[in-house]
Amino acid sequence: MFGPKTYADEDLAREAMEAIRWPNGPVCHHCESKKYYATKKVGRYRCANSKCRKDFTVTTGTVMERSHIPLRKWVEGFAIMCESKKGVSSLQLQRHLKISYKAAWFMSHRIREAMREGGMTPPPMLGGGGKIVEADETYFGKPEEVYVSPQRKGRPFLKGHKKRNSRPIVSLVERGGRIRSFHVASADQDVVTNIVRENINHETRLHTDESRLYARMSEEVAKHETVRHAIKEYARGDVTTNSVEGFFGIFKRGMRGVYQHCKEKHLHRYLAEFDFRYNHRVAMGVGDGVRALLAIRGAEGKRLTYRQAH
Ligand SMILES: [Zn+2]
């Protein structure tokens, strides 16, 4: 679909983007009309629906809208971020694409947004049909706001509150299948129960550790089985949480290696990136080119304003 030639030629890049977004020809973003006029500007179309008549391009209504970065650099940016196994820093993008650091930073966050599940259509439930889903929680990052107790006269209260102050992540992984991760304000029983209810098909076997967070899970799924990490039990028959723990390992190593500085408000985007990579891994039959194509498709319906990107 694209390669070095596309990265060097703006018209080829635009045509590649158009072929991905509109396999059957341009469609008006505003009213979905398939009838359009060409305008004097290449790549700009005018809707032929007399009630609409608005102009649109291949980036209208996507994370690339109103960006001044040339399309050929966007295409290459998508390819670089989708080929990488561990992630790509803004600095690497800046050097490789010869754009400013600020532009690279915006681009990488917009591409992460494109990688996020959902957008135009809600993602399907995980599990079902007796499949196994593993659920687990982890904590990542340093606290940004230290809890200060009024009784302690302004001295930060940290001891024993590490978990409270770092950032909880809850992930659900289908055994041999897809993952879905959540950055939550706090990982408590209600939060975790809601995530399971909204994302896992009832006809699922759920595997977790013995944490009290999962105490009410038997009401949410066909069968809830636990491994008891407290007595060093990591697998009992096919009951294990190894897949989800493996993902946490990949996520944390990647974040430490490439993204040293991650503000809490951006954590969900990095999670979306790691989820995307996991969901479109080679073992799932997805090659580099197809992965980039899927990410570009995900750019639609997810406009990201300047303010949101910050
Ligand atoms: Zn229209």
Image (cartoon, rainbow, N blue to C red):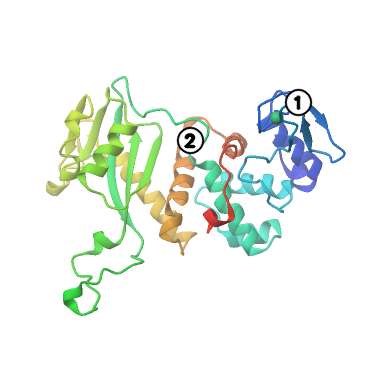
Residue 133 vs 5, above or below: the answer is above
Which residue is rendered at x = 24% and y = 64% of the image?
162
Q: Where in the figure is residue 197, as x and y percent of width and height?
A: 28, 32
Residue 252, placed above or below residue 127:
below
Q: Is residue 266 left or right of residue 10?
A: left
- Residue 206, image x, y percentages: 24, 32
Q: Of the residues shown, which amino acid type is indicated by label 2?
A: Gly
Of labels 1 and 2, earlier in sequence is 1
What residue lies at 16% left-to-right and 36% top-to-bottom? Answer: 216
Q: Position of residue 190 (x, y in %)?
A: 22, 42
Please name the residue that numbered disc 2 is placed on.
Answer: 118
**Marks 1 & 2, CB-CB < 8 Å contact:** no
Q: Residue furthest front?
A: 51
Label 1 belongs to which residue? Answer: 50
Q: Residue furthest left?
A: 231
Left or right placement of residue 75 versus residue 216 in this view = right
- Residue 77 image point, x, y percent: 64, 49
Ligand 1 in which quarter: top right
Residue at image x 72%, y 27%? 51
Q: Residues within 10 Å of mark 2 (few under 14, many from 20)?
A: few
Q: Answer few, some or many: residues within 10 Å of disc 1's Cα (few below 14, many 20 plus, some between 14 and 19).
A: few
Q: Compared to 198, does 268 lie above or below?
A: below
- Which amino acid is tagged 1? Ser
Cα–Cα span, label 1 and label 2? 32 Å
Closest to the observer: 75 or 228? Answer: 75
